[in-house]
Amino acid sequence: MPEVIHDPKQIDFEKPGKHHYQAAFHLDSTWGYSLLPLTVINGTRGGGAPSSPPAVVAFGGTHGNEYEGQVSVKRLCHDLDTAALRGRVILVPQLSPGACTANLRVSPLDGVNMNRAFPGDPGGTISYRIADFVKRYLFPQVHVVLDIHSGGMEGCFPFCSSFHPIPDPAQRAEIERVARLFDTPFILVYSSDMTSGLLTDEAEAEGKITIGGEFGYGESTHVDGTRHAYEGIKNVLRHYGLLDGAIVRIREEGSEPTRLVDAANLDDYVPTPRDGVWEPVVHLGQRVEAGELLGRLHDFSDHSAPALEIRTERAGWVLMLHFRAMVAKGATLYVVAREPAT
């Protein structure tokens, strides 16, 4: 059984071998705890500290109703062999335990979205205290940060790894190289202006090589998305020399090369103009032209009235569609991403 830890200073990040913990965070209104699953692996394959490879942390369950990351990271807690590993890997399969247990995007313990809680607050509610733990105790241990997401019930995406616009050219170039190791059809450069408090924003600002991504949707565990997440994380370990072996191709041979696309502006995230029932008529990842029909928004208060046609104002690739048929005014309805400006 994992060791229950009440003080983060009890975690020995240098100890050789594989060690499973449950970090205890006291609940705000009871005598109980929320237990954060955490595995720290220091490989025993040899190599001195001066030449040790960069350490890696991988998170699943930042949102509780997104399962590809939870499953992939949990499997790696078991599957990674310390004798085959060189360097340090930290694995957190369920970053928001309350949200994961409840199958929710936000934690029911405090109503907070973990991916809006960074940099955290040691005196805040439980989600902010977990974010503070990540910021103060996990980030200093690693150089590479992987945060595995999927659409949950918010939206559906073609499989993509992702990152924000990065001003430092060297950091930007290495992030793109690492993003390609997930072998997804797309790499999405997405907006930093939509919200604050993201785990990836915090890690990028610290200079970490930081990758997010969307590997499924619909509160499912997609077989292909899970494979991209699991093998992609292992490819990152191979890339940095923590594991031996060549980079693994995840998609079928003959698949089109990964396409880098850009949705870095707020106006790329198009809001729904009114409540209705959403009928998309295009496929995820499809190339569309300016003015092309993306879908119809139906109002059943008058079933004889024509649907409102939703057309894109720009050419590009369909990188997100609202998942649920019922859609509320103001929710992001679609994203059409473009080739990055050169």
Image (spheres, rainbow, N blue to C red):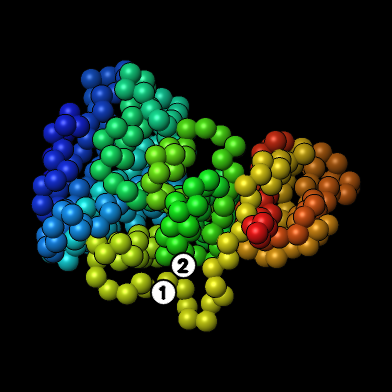
**Label pair 2/1, CB-CB below 8 angstroms:** yes
* Residue to which mark 1 is pinned: 249
Q: Quadrant of residue 245?
A: bottom left
Q: Is residue 66 above or below residue 319?
A: above
Q: Residue at x 22, y 35 (%)?
A: 23
Q: Is residue 215 visible?
A: no
Residue 220 versus residue 203: which sits nearer the camera? Answer: 203
The quadrant of the picture occupied by the C terminus is bottom right
SS at badge 1: loop
* Residue to which mark 2 is pinned: 183
What is the three-letter code of the residue carrying label 1? Arg
Q: Is residue 126 above or below residue 64?
A: above
Q: How many marks?
A: 2
Q: Is residue 237 above or below residue 153?
A: below
Mark 2 surroundings within 10 Å by alpha-carbon count, few (fewer than 14), some (14 through 19), many (20 or more): many
Disc 2 from disc 1: Cα separation? 7 Å
For this view, does 269 lie left or right of residue 117?
A: right
Circle nearer the N terminus (2, 1): 2
For this view, does 87 lie left or right of residue 172?
A: left
* Residue 254 locus on image (x, y percent): 52, 81
